[in-house]
Amino acid sequence: MKVGAIDIGTNSVHLLIAAIDPSGHVEVVEKAREQVELGSGGLSAQELTPEAIARGVRALESFKAACDGHDVEDIYATATSAVREASNGVDFCLAVKEATGIHVRVIAGAEEARLIHLGARRDLDFSAGRVLVFDLGGGSTEFILCDAEDALLQQSLRIGHIRMSELFHRTDPLGAEDYRALKTAVRGALTPLLHRVRGGDFQSLVGTSGAVRTLAMMATLRRGDQAPEHAHGLVLHRSELDALVRIFRTEPKATYAKLKGMDPKRIHTLPAGAIIVREVMKAFDVTRLVTSERGLRDGLIVDWVLRHRPEITLAATTPDPRRRAVLATMRHYHADPDHAAFVARASRVLFDATAPLHGLRIDDRRTLEFAAQLHDIGHHIAGKDHQKHGMYLIRHTRMPGFTAPEIDVMAQLVRYHRGRGPRNKHQAFAALKSEDKARVRVLSGILQLADALDRGHDQNTTQLSADLEGGELRVSATTREAPDLERWSSIRRKKLLEDSLGIAVNIEVQKAITGP
């Protein structure tokens, strides 16, 4: 199965599409990045600008199209510093939801750090001891002290390259006063972390963000090394960073594009980023760091795998995406699997027996089976009117593999698995096409009778057969214990099937004969 992870940061929006096999192994299918500068001009004011919101929504629309093109079954999206601090962050999330259908989860700094650790840990080298991972974002920087087994400390600090640029990089090149103020602000922000972690508490420093990787790439090319094909495992020495900071302090921004390895989209904020990284290295008395290409979006995929082990197992045993979606929905809403399985089997028996009369297709048989498995999920909300709640849940649950018309019919079958049956005064039913209305009447009649034959949800009915004889449908059932409940319930709920097929339904329910 395929999953999409979207990291909505202050500077960039990242997409990772991964194929996950039954063992939980992750294979990257596609990566994409859009530099939308969501927090640009808004971090200080704690408000996203209309232009930034528009850029962010366009990026998410593009990513949604990419996910659809790869048949992605689930999209896991999070937003970090810029959105969580903005007074109109909710407006941005609603705009994304309306434009793409993607639900954006706004996460706190500690959760951001946890996800970064999940994404980076499989590539970290713990042979020398503990590792301090830091991710320099546009609005915040996350620090994670970890060993081979666990994250020992996670902390998020409000020092990001966009935030610091807005506050302190007011002259071109960077003036002495702003330079001193920027360094002082970073050192002050690091103080609480330094009370908990000292340089001797870890043996390796790893930077995971794009800003850090850009600085390391620039240093690599400046020392004359061959340009690598990727930015993973690059080494950045503090002396090399000192040289880059001197350039940023003395040269105007217009000249930065000529620097080897410079990302043109980072020209305005990388000087502040370089100073933050240097202050981190100095604070911990570290002379070099190593880069990692793993980050939050990788952590989202790992987190998804950890949260969805049942779905992964289901994907291995159930290749049909529609059946897989139904089983996952049943599990999510805690449906009774034994009762659902009985009603599905009974529905198939009744469908096949009445096929000469209704003339429905094999696809309708499968729709009926799926609706039978889902018919009681409304109990997740409330027992009373659970058929209506079930219809609502089916309409609002993402079920890959189904078309919108199929969802409509299935929801209607769940709606009418009990009660008087379809009525044109019911708005949702009235909106169906005439052929779908006829289909719903017949199939919901079958579903009502099948459900009645397990009225006690104890599978007391052990054998079931149905045949057309003499212009009527004869249904014969055998029970393990006394058949009173099944007989009473099925006789009460046969009328909808009789009316939809225009025949009488004769039901015989008897207890199985046991030996002396």
Image (spheres, grey):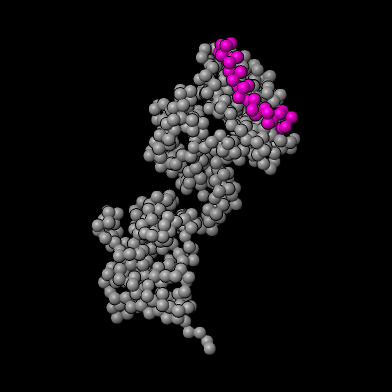
Is residue 243 rendered to the left or right of residue 38? right
The quarter of the picture where residue 196 lies is top right
At a point 41% along the width and 72% down the height, the residue shown is 453
At a point 45% along the width and 38% down the height, the residue shown is 63
- Residue 99 can be seen, yes or no: yes
| Image x and y of residue 491, in percent | 34, 74
The reply to whether the magenta stretch includes residue 201 is yes
| Image x and y of residue 417, in percent | 36, 63
**Relative to 397, does residue 126 appear above or below in the rendering?**
above
**Relative to 115, does residue 480 appear above or below in the rendering?**
below
Q: Nearer the viewer, residue 57 or 224?
A: 57
The quarter of the picture where residue 381 lies is bottom left
Which range is magenta? 174-202
Q: Report the number of discs.
A: 0
Dominant secondary structure, magenta: helix
Q: Nearer the viewer, residue 261 or 178?
A: 178
At a point 41% along the width and 74% down the height, the residue shown is 486
Is residue 464 rendered to the left or right of residue 259? left
| Image x and y of residue 150, in percent | 67, 41
- Residue 327 can be seen, yes or no: no
Is residue 233 rendered to the left or right of residue 311? right
At a point 43% along the width and 41% down the height, the residue shown is 102
**Relative to 211, does residue 427 appear above or below in the rendering?**
below
The reply to whether the magenta stretch includes residue 218 is no
| Image x and y of residue 367, in percent | 39, 60
